[in-house]
Image: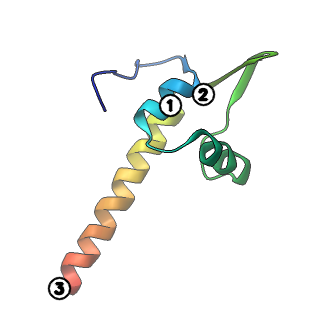
Amino acid sequence: MNDYKLPDTGFIRLKAVLHHIPIGKSSWWAGVAEGRYPRPYKIGPRTTVWKVEDIRGFINSQKQASSTVEGVKHAKS
């Protein structure tokens, strides 16, 4: 989305996560609480981050799941 690229390693804040994953903040936090999304890390009293590697892995797993579903749809056609 847009031209923001994920760094190779490190941590990113929620705004950057949501830049790559089209979902609202409340839905994201609900998914985190349910274990559907990567777990965050608290690095300060008001600072929460996610590992870039975890977010990239989540995005890739969603792409793979999506392509698998598409393959099933085409096979049934």
- Residue type indicated by callout 1: Val
Query: Is 65 rendered above or below residue 61?
Result: below
- Residue 32: name its quadrant: top right
Judge left or right: residue 13 versus residue 66: right
Query: Is 74 rendered above or below residue 62?
Result: below
How far apart marks 2 and 1 lie (CA) works out to 8 Å
**Of pointers 2 and 1, the one earlier in the residue sequence:** 1
Question: Residue placed farthest to the right in the image?
Answer: 45
The picture places residue 29, in percent across and down from the top left corner, at: 67, 42
Q: Mark 1 packing: few (<14 Cα in 10 Å), some, or many (20+)? A: many
Look at the numbered disc 1 and give the secondary structure of its residue: helix
Query: Mark 2 against mark 1, which lies toward the viewer?
Result: 1
Q: Are marks 2 and 1 in contact (CB under 8 Å)?
A: yes
Judge left or right: residue 43 versus residue 53: right
Look at the numbered disc 2 and give the secondary structure of its residue: strand
Q: Is residue 27 visible?
A: yes
The residue pinned by badge 3 equals 77
